Amino acid sequence: RCDARARDHVMMLRSMTLFSAMQLASAYSAGSARMLSRSAMLRGGAKMLAEGDALPSAEFMIMEGGPKPLASTDIFSGKKVVLFGLPGAMTPTCSEQQLPGFVELAEDFKAKGVDTIACVAVNDPFVLGEWSKAKDPEGKVVMLGDGGAQFTKATGLDFDTGNFGGVRMVRCAMIVDDGKVVKLGVEKGGAFEGASSAESMLEAL
């Protein structure tokens, strides 16, 4: 009888371990921003940003003759802004799929009352500055460097790429009116399936 109880106990522990492993694998393979946000909450991180929320205050770095700080209030206060976030400058999907749409449709956004189109990434301002020169020579998109990921983490839209590049921003896009998020599209990690596209944001205006 003792042996039977011991076997039952071992089997229960194995089942619990297997279930936990399956849960962990599922969370990583799904890679969704919501799962990552829940993980961040367990680590003491921020709740994921949602429509209706006010953007957290932050200080970004921009290139304007050199690296300069720019407060979030200077960007969003009293303005309608289309803000999109991405895992990193110079990366293929960001460079060839997400950014070009916002550059090409810049005038269409302006015609719908948008004051500023901005991009935020966990990169230093020098990298973003060079990327802007290469992909947006007319400077239609304001590049916001969040090098320390403070803004990214505060929005709960962060995910950890490990040795590839550390903490980065989930691919996303939003319409912000006077600092308040009125439309938010979030992709699964670094994927690009349309939720964060320029076309989706333009259609929502």
Image (spheres, helix red, strand yellow):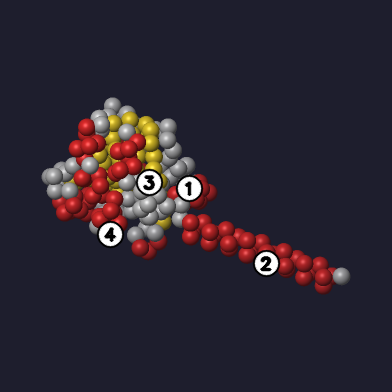
For the residues marked 4 and 1, what is the alpha-carbon distance in whole angstroms?
24 Å
Point out the tag, 3 or 1, that comes first from the N-terminus.
1
Residue under numbered circle 2: 14
Residue under numbered circle 4: 92
Residue 176 in the figure: left or right of residue 133: right
Instruction: Assess whether mark 2 and mark 1 are in contact (beta carbons under 8 angstroms).
Output: no
119 in relation to 74, above or below: below
Which callout, 1 or 2, points to the residue nearer the camera? Answer: 1
Q: Residues within 10 Å of mark 1 (few under 14, many from 20)?
A: many
Check disc 1 and give the amino acid type: Arg
Which callout, 3 or 1, points to the residue nearer the camera? Answer: 3
Q: Residue at x 25, y 47 (%)?
A: 101
For the residues marked 4 and 2, what is the alpha-carbon distance in whole angstroms?
42 Å
Check disc 2 and give the amino acid type: Arg
For the residues marked 3 and 2, what is the alpha-carbon distance in whole angstroms?
40 Å
Secondary structure at numbered mark 2: helix
The x and y percentages for residue 112 are 25, 31
Point out the tag, 1 or 2, that comes first from the N-terminus.
2
Check disc 4 and give the amino acid type: Pro
- Residue 80 figure quarter: top left
